[in-house]
Image (spheres, rainbow, N blue to C red):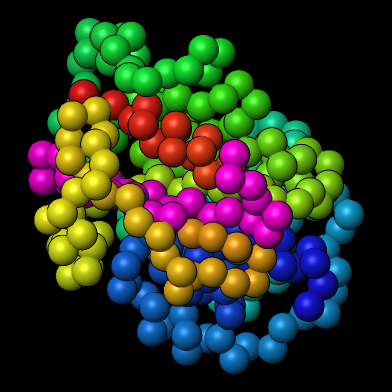
Amino acid sequence: MPRMIKRALSRISPKTRVTALTLLAAVAVGVGVAWVVANATQPATSEEPDPVPDFSQRPLTPLGVPTLLPTRIPLEEWPDCRAPRDEVPGPGLPPLPCHYEGSEPPPGTIPTASAEERPAAIASTQNVPKGWEVYDNPMFRYTFALPADWYANMRPEGGEFAVFDPNEMAFFENGEDREGGVVMFFSAGLPSVRLSEADAERLDTPNAEFGGYDGVIWEDPDSVGLGVARVMVFAFLKDGVVFRGRINFGEGYTEADVATVRQILATITPY
């Protein structure tokens, strides 16, 4: 399998890597998995991607990440999105997320933050290392911080988003295929949709804290493979909504990458 295709597959949940078409299994546990598997036998293409991918001409996953592979699923049959799937904010940048309904709770579930709450929340973000930039996700009502050279493709209104480290950004900027690379996918939803029985049991024995809310961080070895060398998952509950994320570490990642990810998670501060 060409390395570029492995890189493409490293950007999606390994549960759906046989189709390389969707991040559905990564962001909506148990939703649509059978349908995806049923389409896994579609013939693949041998065409190599362009050296510098033209994202405007390639299908996108529900989280707004290019598949880099042609899709045989008609767009009208893809999971519902509340925003366009193909918006690229600028050259060399990942596409914006599409507000995929499986990655966000129904509208109105999370109360809208007031104009006064947001500045206060940004100012009170916890555990921010010097030089990091603070971000606000008003739809999910939490802030977080990233190193200056990391990138979040979050829309101004917030909601589902992804975070890319410099190695991953090099791929978007010029097609450079670096070792390692970290992609973090952030989502939210109702517990009945987003929590499996195993996840609920994990939350009963929290091992982490997210801005005063008990949560859990765990490893997902079953999702390792095809360019993804390690997978971490986190989750916490607030006001009847489960907030969670999946972190994919590319082959060649370092323990420094893991430490940085844990620092990022420690800055998540709900408000």
Front one among 127 and 42: 127
Q: Position of residue 197 (x, y in %)?
A: 18, 70
Asked whether residue 150 is drawn in magenta, I would say no
Horizontal relation, residue 89 to residue 222: left or right: right
Q: What is the span of residues highlighted in magenta in the rendered image?
A: 232-256
Query: Can residue 80 be spotted in the picture?
Result: no
**Residue 95, quarter of picture:** top right
Front one among 129 and 91: 129
Q: Position of residue 224 (x, y in %)?
A: 54, 69
Q: Is residue 23 above or below residue 135?
A: below
Asked whether residue 249 is drawn in magenta, I would say yes
Residue at image location 40% in from the left, 60% down from the top = 219
Residue at image location 60% in from the left, 63% down from the top = 228
Horizontal relation, residue 247 to residue 94: left or right: left
Q: Is residue 26 above or below residue 105?
A: below
Which quarter of the figure is the C terminus placed in? Answer: top left
Q: Position of residue 92 (x, y in %)?
A: 75, 36
Residue at image location 56% in from the left, 25% down from the top = 147
Which quarter of the figure is the N terminus placed in? Answer: bottom right
Horizontal relation, residue 14 to residue 206: left or right: right
Query: Can residue 10 be spotted in the picture?
Result: yes
Q: Position of residue 222 (x, y in %)?
A: 45, 74
Front one among 144 and 98: 144
Residue at image location 51% in from the left, 38% down from the top = 259
Q: Is residue 163 above or below residue 44?
A: above
Q: Main secondary structure of the magenta part?
A: strand
